[in-house]
Image (cartoon, helix red, strand yellow):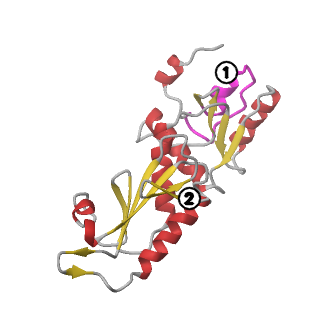
Amino acid sequence: MYGYYNASLKVNNMTERAVRVTLYRWAGSWGPFKIKIPCGECALTKDVILDTLAKELAGIPVNLDIQEWLSNWWRPLARSGWHAPIVMVEGRVISQGSALNRGLLTQAVVEVHSARTPLAGNHLFGKDTCPHCQRGKRYLDNAGLEYQYHNVIHDPRALYEMLARVKPLIGSKTPVTVPQIWIDGQYVGGANPLSKLISQKVESNSDRGRCSLSPEQKQRWVMP
């Protein structure tokens, strides 16, 4: 359901701090000037935003504010936004001048939400064709641990969330591999660190390269 909230469009669950999304559409007036020609790509962008919030971003609290560009032209211009339709997430321009690519919106919103909201519970981000992901799932199953599996190939939101959560931990220049695992909300890394954590035999891992878990993070991890 969508409804108006403080002159903005209230979307999804508002119990958490909402991610702020602003759309400046080709409309409005400034002094003697008034926009009379409708903008088809602005209408498309609004529809794309609403559909993305209802699907890929379902469950993430978002506050969508739709503004007339000419009546507020100086606001987006301060952030290098000058060509409607302009889409901003938390004050950062992610698209302008053409109909919105929904992937850009999904990535930007997920990045902000992930930075604000720590993971809780057990999670494994991976892909179905990855043997190390299957090994990690087997370790969790054998240990009797319930967990949520996120397929980063089928689900763009899962991919963006994994990258947003892992990169700050391992460094921006460290390649991100799968699986990426959290136990009780604490970052573990790949299948090898998981096997040590739950005391299961580690299988050969020669084709994967080094694990994403840094030495510093290994030292910080306290075994139960």
Q: Is residue 153 above or below residue 141?
A: below
Dot 1: element: helix
Distance from disc 2 to disc 1, alpha carbons, whole Å, reads 37 Å
Between 129 and 70, the one lying in front of the other is 70
In terms of image quadrants, where is residue 79?
A: bottom left
Q: Residue at x 45, y 69 (%)?
A: 100
The N terminus lies in quadrant: bottom right
Find the magenta span and give its range. 189-211
Please say whether residue 45 is one of the residues in the magenta stretch: no
Local crowd at mark 2 within 10 Å, few (<14), some, or many (≥20)? many
In terms of image quadrants, where is residue 39?
A: bottom left
Can residue 60 be spotted in the picture? yes
Judging by the rendered image, the residue that carries numbered circle 2 is 53
Q: Is residue 209 left or right of residue 142?
A: left
Which is more foreground, mark 2 or mark 1?
Answer: 2
- Magenta stretch: dominant SS? loop
Q: Is residue 174 left or right of residue 179?
A: left
Horizontal and vertical percent position of residue 174: 45, 40
Can residue 82 be spotted in the picture? no
Q: Residue at x 41, y 41 (%)?
A: 172
Q: Is residue 198 left or right of residue 166?
A: right
Label located before the other in sequence (2 or 1): 2
Between 59 and 139, the one lying in front of the other is 59
Q: Residue at x 51, y 62 (%)?
A: 103
Judging by the rendered image, the residue that carries numbered circle 1 is 197
| Badge 2 amino acid | Leu
Please say whether residue 192 is one of the residues in the magenta stretch: yes
Between 119 and 136, the one lying in front of the other is 119
Q: Residue at x 51, y 39 (%)?
A: 165
| Badge 1 amino acid | Leu
Horizontal and vertical percent position of residue 33: 21, 80
**Numbered marks: total:** 2
